[in-house]
Each structure stands twice: as structure tokens, then as C-alpha cells.
Image: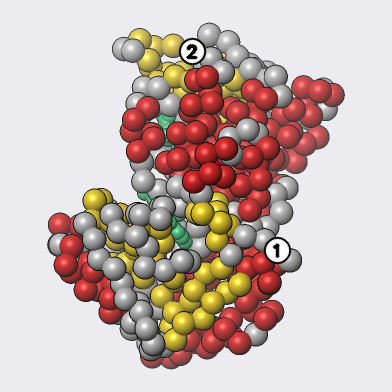
Amino acid sequence: MRTTVGIVGGGPAGLLLARLLHNAGIDCVVLESRDRSYVEGRQRAGILEQGTVEVLRECGAGARMDREGLVHEGIELRFDRRAHRVDFPALTGGRTVMVYAQTEVVKDLIALRLADNAPLLFEARVSGISGADTDQPVVHFTHQGREHTLTCDYVVGCDGFHGVARAAVPEAVRRTYERTYPYSWLGVLADVPPSCDELIYAHSPRGFALHSMRSRTVSRLYLQVPNGADPADWPDERVWDELDQRFAVDGDWTLERGPITAKSVLPMRSFVTEPMRYGRVFLAGDAAHIVPPTGAKGLNLAVADVVVLARALVHRYATGATDLLDAYSDTCLRRVWRAEHFSYSMTTTLHTDPEQSEFDTRLQLAQLDRIASATTAAAELAENYTGLPIG
Ligand code: FAD
Ligand code: DHB
């Protein structure tokens, strides 16, 4: 098999890249190891930056998002039993975010690709990439019990943190930067209308909690839990009781309870691999970097990477020039490190480290109070949350 751009992984990064290239008339093949229903059902991110929303609209994947997504103009911070709203449009010159689940973005992109009759192979597991430093890199994969090769002009690894594409960058060239955190998130989905109009990020003496949503009828909630926590130790009543305590605030507030339909524990990690390109192999999204979820940057970073890459590939095929491809890694990494910093600081300001001293807690509260009282500090949060410019 031969194609122009071989895409390893059919998550949001791979599927969006395929859409952008298809619209520009560049052939590509997407190889995804899982089946369609698994990929469409995998519960992950829920918040789209304004730039992500615009990209999805411009590439023709925004119709259902615009019908069903919820535009949010702020978030609430809770700490010290106080509530403070961060008003995004007022602080950023009009920017907002959209609540629209990653599962739905993925479903929309898959439907478009299949409607275009463009190649997207499910249950096609890539085992490796050879010839990264040649003009004809080759992707090796298994599909329907048989081994295949896909010869390409360029290969893009969009295969997530546990993928194989990263290994195409030789160890002698690769640098990795990593941080783990001494806590995880227990995430639950509940069939109950959200108890708030906007997301609530809560700092509390019992640890962090986040109230998010998937729609007007489905709530998504997260609780900081110790690493290694087992969802089986968290029966529904315990989850709701703990959330009640962490969201406690002076004044009127009721957390509505409802049937919990999914429960899982997510580890937290910061990770960056550099460079994001070796020869004719490029890395995009979680294959190249991971952020802890606080602040909802992961999916949005993946989108920004593939927008930069699609632009560079279109430029390459329109003009023959490789300058934008050559700049890809540096262009992306600048934004990646900014998002790493934002996600790290949101995480460490809002969570309770098991080793935390009273002094550390006072520092966290001072920082939250600063955001609540100084427009400059609130604007810094709002600009990062709604998304920095792409590229
Ligand atoms: P992925 O979505 O991981 O897609 C990679 C794809 O490659 C997958 O479909 C995988 O099956 C496929 N693949 C892997 N190996 C191979 C192979 N060898 N051959 C072929 N295909 C392969 N972000 C937030 O902002 N908020 C959240 O609440 C949040 N929750 C998360 C929860 C979890 C459990 C995880 C893992 C991530 C979460 N994220 C969250 C991060 C966000 O979902 C990711 O940043 C986003 O999915 C990145 O998209 P991607 O396409 O780069 O990678
Ligand atoms: C969600 C996840 C996040 O990490 C976040 O900061 C906000 C919302 C979510 O899954 O809805």
C-alpha cells in the first residue's frame, strides 16, 4: 500500500489531521488499532478552546457541535468556602470555550471521513515505522490477521502516549521531560442535570474537586484521590458525600445527585518529548506530550499540533518548500511548554499534596485570592484557559 501521508492513530489528532489534508487534496491513510465503537466511546476531555472550535467549524466538522455544544463564558473557582467567577470575554476581549465532549468530536470526524470514502482502517495495529530518515518511510501494521506495509512521503504519529511512533526518533536524538504527581482523579459520569451553569474548580481542605458537564442532562465530576485508588472503593454515596464536602461554600448551593453511569481513575502526568520530528516522521498530540488534565489542555494541544502540521504539509505540496515542516517542532514546542506550565500551575494550586504543609496551603490560597482580586492575574488564567493563538 502507498499513500502521501501515513497517519498512525485515529484519535482526535489523527482524525482531524486526516480531515485537514483531505480538504486540501492530500491523500492520507489513518491506521487505528482499536475498533470504531471503542474509539467513539472512550470517555476523555470535554472542553474545547475557542481556537479548536473555529478549526472544527472551518474544516466542516462543526455542525453538530454548534447545535449541541454549550458555549461557556467563564468558570467558577471555589476556595476557603468562597466562590469567585472568572469572566472570560471580559478578560480576553471576547473569548469563550465550548463544552462538547471528545467522544462527540471523534464521532463527527469519523462520520465525515467515512462519508468521504477516505481510508480509515480500524483494528489496524502499527508495530513500527522504518526508514524515518529516508524519502520513503514505511509503516508496518497488522490488519485482519495479516501483516501489511504502508509506504509514505511522510508519517505522522498520532498514536497517543502509549503508541509506537515515538520510538522512530532515535534515542540518541530524543530528549524527554517528565513529572508525575502524588494524586490521581476519580472521574464519574452521572445522569443528572449539572448543578451549575459553568464549571467549578474547587480547592478544599479535603483535596480538589471539579464539576463539569457533558450536556444539559449529564454531569461529569472529578475528585482528587490517592494514586492507586480503586473505583470499587468509591460507591456512589461516598462519591456524592465527598463532592458535597469539597464544593461546600457559604451561601446557597445544592449538588444534585443522580445515577452514576461510569467511574474511572486517571493518573496525572506532565511529559514532553523533543524534538517532535525526526526525518520524515512527525509526532502530534499525546504521542509527543501529556499534561495533567486540570485546565483541559490535552485535546486542544493535539488540535493545535495538527493544524500547524497540516499547514506545513499543504505549503510543502503547493510550493515544494519544506521550511514550515522544518519549523514544525519548534513552533509546536513553544506552545506546548506554555500549556505545560499552565496545566502544572492549575494542578499544583488546586490540589492537596499528601506531604503539603500549612505554609504550602497558605501559598495556594494567596494565589487563588490574587486571581479573585486582581484583573491581571485573572486575565492570565482566562487567556490560557480559552487558548493561546495557534502557531
Ligand atoms: P489519543 O486520543 O490517545 O489517540 C491515539 C490513538 O492512537 C488511539 O485511538 C489509539 O487507539 C491509537 N493507537 C495507539 N497505538 C496505536 C498503534 N500501535 N497502532 C495504531 N493505532 C494506535 N484531556 C482533557 O483536556 N480533559 C480531560 O478530562 C481528559 N481526560 C483524559 C482521560 C484519559 C484516560 C486520557 C488518557 C486522556 C485524557 N485527556 C483529557 C487528554 C486528552 O483526551 C488527550 O490529550 C487527547 O485524547 C489527545 O488526542 P490524541 O489523538 O493525541 O491521542
Ligand atoms: C473536563 C476535564 C478537565 O480536565 C477540565 O479541566 C475541565 C473539564 C471535562 O472532562 O469535562
* Depicted 60 relative to depicted 285: above or below: above
On the image, numbered disc 1 is attached to which residue? 94
Q: Give neighbour class at mark 1: few <14, some 14-19, many 20+ (Cα, 10 Å).
A: few
Toward which corner of the image does residue 277 lie, by quadrant?
top right
On the image, numbered disc 2 is attached to which residue? 149
Q: Secondary structure at mark 2?
A: strand
Q: Is mark 2 within 8 Å of ligand 1?
A: no
Q: Secondary structure at mark 1?
A: loop
- Image quadrant of ligand 2 equals bottom left
For the point 57% across and 83% down, the residue is: 372
For the point 15% across and 62% down, the residue is: 235
Residue 106 vs residue 33: left or right? right
Residue 223 vs residue 329: left or right? left
Toward which corner of the image does residue 357 lie, by quadrant?
bottom left
Whole-percent x, y for residue 318 in the image: 81, 23
Frontmost residue, 382 versus 233: 382
* Depicted 362 relative to depicted 264: above or below: below
